[in-house]
């Protein structure tokens, strides 16, 4: 059966959707059958892989609330081995409609039971909150990937997330683990980035990935074109780093890792090239 991983942090703006979209894309490009599930009513993961969230008629809402067959909701993408279960603003009503339902925390887990063995990885992009949608994602998952931005107060609120994970383990999913902690939006020109990396490694120890995702204009541009970074600009530092992350997750050796000290020079070169202007 496929491994189910929720990308989760209740703070917004930490690179959660960017990570879910681009990690899914690179896992698929490495030959793994991958399913991305958009559990955020904003639907940014949906549009980020090129699916028009405003024109789709069936979304994850229908699997959660009306119990439609989840396989009928899966949509293919421009990457052969990557599919998505989309979301749009209809999902806002799911938490209200499910509030009185018995066993509502298990709806996603139950919905995925028929599809799980068809994928190597199922990644869930959760909303920036710890409400019922996120609890559904955590209950259905084997593990959690936590993105943390390299900024002030980066670890603020993580104690609340840790408590939520413990509550889910105790009451709903005793096998839930932390898959890894990913440091994002790094700027290696500042002392702050180094301090946050050190603080995160002290707090989470070996759960912190070696790969660190830098701030990169190409990563911010790609969603507006409805493309993962692998399709938008494979040569960019953002693409190279998310590919490194996928290989690290797969336990494969990275033949030419990019040293963090070199990242800023590469970004500077990208930003001054004709197509980076």
Image (spheres, grey):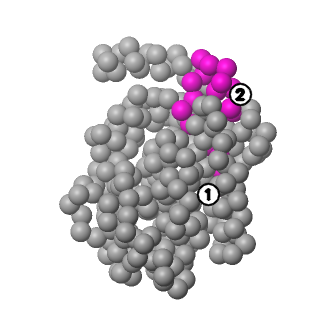
Q: If the image is split into quadrants, where does the N terminus sit?
A: bottom right
Query: Is the residue marked by circle 1 packed among few (<14), some (14-19), or many (20+) residues within 10 Å?
Result: many
Q: Quadrant of residue 244?
A: top right
Q: If the image is split into quadrants, where does the C terminus sit?
A: top left
Q: Is residue 65 visible?
A: yes
Tell me the residue at 68%/26% (across/down): 194
Q: Measured from the top left, where is residue 19 in percent x and y?
A: 49, 46
Front one among 133 and 219: 133
Front one among 80 and 205: 205
Is residue 97 depicted above or below 268 in this figure?
Answer: below
In the displayed image of the protein, which residue is found farthest to the left?
55
Please give the label number shown on residue 195: 2
Residue under pointer 1: 144
Please give the label number shown on residue 235: none
Q: Quadrant of residue 103?
A: bottom right
- The numbered mark, 1 or 2, whose residue comes first in the sequence reads 1
Tell me the residue at 52%/68% (across/down): 132
Is residue 101 depicted above or below 269 in this figure?
Answer: below
Give the magenta range. 179-197
Is residue 228 depicted above or below 61 in this figure?
Answer: above
Q: Measured from the top left, where is residue 185 in percent x and y?
A: 54, 32
């Amino acid at each position: 059966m496929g491994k189910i991983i929720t990308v989760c942090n209740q703070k917004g703006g930490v690179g959660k959707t960017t990570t879910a979209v681009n990690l899914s894309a690179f896992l698929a490009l490495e030959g793994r059958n991958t399913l991305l599930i958009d559990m955020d009513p904003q639907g940014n993961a949906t549009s980020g892989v090129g699916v028009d969230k405003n024109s789709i008629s069936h979304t994850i809402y229908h699997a959660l609330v009306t119990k439609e067959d989840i396989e009928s909701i899966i949509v293919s993408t421009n990457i052969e081995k990557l599919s998505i279960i989309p979301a749009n603003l209809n999902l806002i009503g799911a938490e209200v409609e499910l509030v009185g339902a018995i066993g509502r925390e298990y709806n996603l887990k139950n919905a995925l039971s028929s599809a799980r063995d068809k994928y190597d990885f199922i990644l869930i992009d959760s909303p920036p909150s710890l409400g019922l949608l996120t609890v559904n994602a955590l209950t259905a998952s084997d593990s959690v990937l936590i993105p943390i931005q390299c900024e002030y107060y980066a670890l603020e609120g993580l104690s609340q997330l840790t408590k939520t994970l413990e509550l889910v383990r105790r009451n709903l999913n005793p096998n839930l683990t932390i898959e890894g902690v990913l440091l994002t939006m790094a700027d290696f020109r500042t002392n702050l980035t180094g301090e946050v990396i050190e603080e995160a490694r002290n707090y989470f120890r070996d759960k912190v990935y070696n790969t660190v995702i830098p701030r990169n204009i190409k990563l911010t541009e790609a969603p507006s074109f409805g493309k993962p970074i692998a399709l938008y600009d494979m040569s960019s530092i953002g693409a190279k780093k998310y590919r490194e992350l996928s290989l690290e997750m797969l336990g494969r050796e990275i033949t030419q890792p990019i040293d963090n000290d070199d990242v800023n020079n590469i970004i500077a070169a990208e930003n001054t090239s004709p197509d980076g202007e």
